[in-house]
Amino acid sequence: MTAPVMLVTGSGRDRLGRQLVDAFADQGYAIALHYHSSAEEAQQAVQELRDRGVTVEAYQANVAEEGEVEQMIADVVQRFGRIDLLACTASIWPTIPLEQTTAADVLKSFEVNTLGSFLCAKAAGLAMTKQPTGGSIVLFGDWAIERPYKDHAAYFIAKGAIPTLTRMLAVELAERNPQVRVNCIHPGPVLFPPGLTEAEQQESIDSTLVKTANCPDAIVQAVQLLASNPMMTGVCLPVDGGRTIFARE
């Protein structure tokens, strides 16, 4: 395998992970597409990519299950020979009022959003340390961990740990191979969720300094930057159009 290899978790459905898959496939990457439950959508994506001449395989795993993650990484390395780039986009975003948020809700969000990111990054990162060229890992936090909004306590508890996870893995993996780098992106309103009304879409646009939203290419460009810049590691990069710093009057 001469093409670089990218693994994207949570890329079965047509959301942010799939956007990364499509973009990096166009750049010549071989793709390992991960899904948990959306098998039909994942297989359709694989067929579409193969029709475009992309080397791609789909892998099913629960990212919160250590054994399944380790097996997935081993299978990817066996199939492709290595992993050059990992993007951890697998995530859940439950909307639950605080009064109804239970310990089970918090644990579920932690398992997918935090533990899942750790297990995938750990297994892929350790595989990368054995590669002379190392590799790059990109985790995903959220712009709003600095300014959380209501009804998402379980989500923000989990996502709030991602910056520390990023820095810890950057240190640990670089000790084993200085060519392995770990960074994080804090996305803003880069991809509208399904069912958003026109008024809600406009609100997302108005909440940014750049008056732009629903622009997944901005995340693609950020991943490209973090994957290619050899001096960037342990960085948490906001890609939010200035939303974090914008306090509207």
Image (cartoon, rainbow, N blue to C red):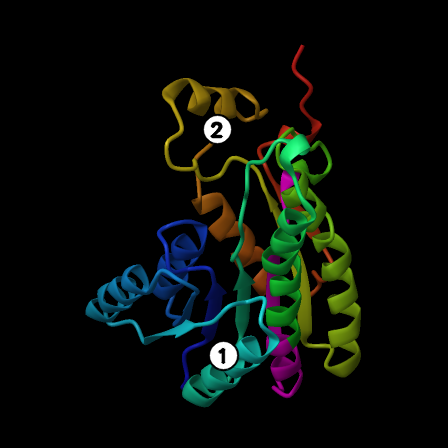
Is 136 contained in the magenta span?
yes
Q: Position of residue 113 (x, y in %)?
A: 61, 55
Which of the 4 image quadrants contains residue 229?
bottom right
Check if mark 1's residue and mark 2's residue have beta carbons within 8 Å: no
Write down the quadrant of residue 107 in the picture: bottom right
User: What residue is shown at x 62% (from left), y 29% (from top)?
Assistant: 243
Q: Is residue 9 visible?
A: yes
Q: Which residues are magenta?
A: 123-143
Q: Say which amino acid is labelled 2.
A: Thr
Q: Earlier in the sequence, mark 1 or mark 2?
A: 1
Image coords of residue 150 (percent x, y): 65, 28
Mark 2 neighbour class, 10 Å CA radius: few under 14, some 14 to 19, many 20 or more: some
Distance of label 1 from label 2 (alpha carbons):
37 Å
Q: Amino acid at mark 1?
A: Met
Residue 212: which numbered mark, if any?
Answer: 2
Q: Where residue 120 sits in the image (x, y, percent)?
A: 59, 70
Residue at 41 percent of width and 78 percent of height: 3
Is disc 2 placed on a helix, strand or loop? loop
Q: Is residue 112 magenta?
A: no
Q: Which mark is residue 72?
A: 1
